[in-house]
Amino acid sequence: MASVPPASVPTLPQPASGLAVWALASREVLRFLRQRSRVIGALGQPVVFWVLFGAGLGPSFRLPGAATGQVAYAEYFFPGVLVLILLFTSIFATISIIEDRREGFLQGVLVAPLSAWTMVAGKGLGAMLLAVGQALVFLALGLALPLSWGVWQLVQLVLFLGLLSLALVGLGMLLAWRLDSVQGFHAIMNLLLFPMWLLSGAFFPAGDNWLAWVVHVNPLTYGLAGVRRLLYVHQPDAAVLHGLPSLGTCWLVTAAFALLTLAASTWAAARRGRGDLR
């Protein structure tokens, strides 16, 4: 019997990576908008934190340095709430990885002729769009603060928030690929992600004790510092900027943080994929 020439063997069409990334990102956005509890939780809880902590800690808050008492706590805490919104969005977005594995959707994606990077990029893009969109909604409340706004300032802030959200989503995906239960993810989140936020200078300024060293090595510190500097770009001598790293340093560290977490989550997705095909 004559063998079939290789050229006559049909091949499966290869989907465009860009189209696959956009499809996965769109799914994340639609899934989020259809779940009202996620919308309320991701944006409502940070707003409640800002209002309650601003009112409760405001009378006793003092910034270290010569400008003591010149900054209200609600103003100091505002950039921290922006970062908290990004953190909550990354948590909700990456929990869906565990849910997708249980429901069988992830297995369908893994057997498709797509690279692990395409899957990570689609999840990351969808989560970034959600995070930046929610941050912009909350940013409107900043009009009540003594801040000056400009178009170029807003563009830089949006780009920086997008970069920081990718770093946090990459970290969340790295954890989610290695876990099999939502309960375990929440435990790791409470052990790692929230302390990262608390020790970034979001909730209180770094003092001169041992916590200052932890704050300096925390990559989220530079993300928060970049948000502060962009909010006060027209006020370079503002008291809240005292002792913060430069804006260029914040961009470099945040970009390196994003590249590291996304690369690590891609590696974890590729290794996890071989075990999930069952």
Image (tube, helix red, strand yellow):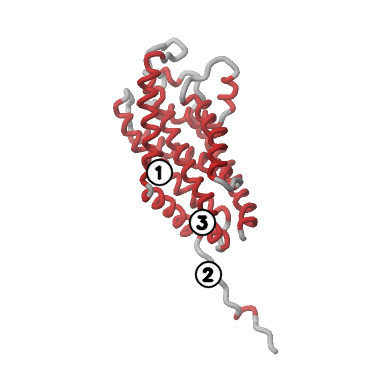
Where residue 113 appears, as percent x and y from the top left, is 56, 63
Q: For marks 3 and 2, give the CA distance.
A: 26 Å
- Would residue 253 be seen by someone viewing this image from the given angle? no
Please name the residue that numbered disc 2 is placed on.
13
Q: Earlier in the sequence, mark 3 or mark 2?
A: 2
Task: Please identify the quarter of the rendering in which residue 146 is found.
Answer: top left
Q: Nearer the viewer, mark 2 or mark 1?
A: 1
Element type at marker 2? loop
Task: Please identify the quarter of the rendering in which residue 75 is found.
Answer: top left
- Residue 38 is tagged as 1
Horizontally, is 278 left or right of 30 in the view?
A: right
Estimate how packed mark 1 is, as few (under 14), some (14 to 19) or many (20 or more) residues with alpha carbons within 10 Å.
some
Q: For marks 1 and 3, give the CA distance.
A: 19 Å
Horizontally, is 184 left or right of 125 in the view?
A: right
Looking at this rendering, what residue extends furthest in the top direction?
66
Please name the residue that numbered disc 3 is placed on.
103
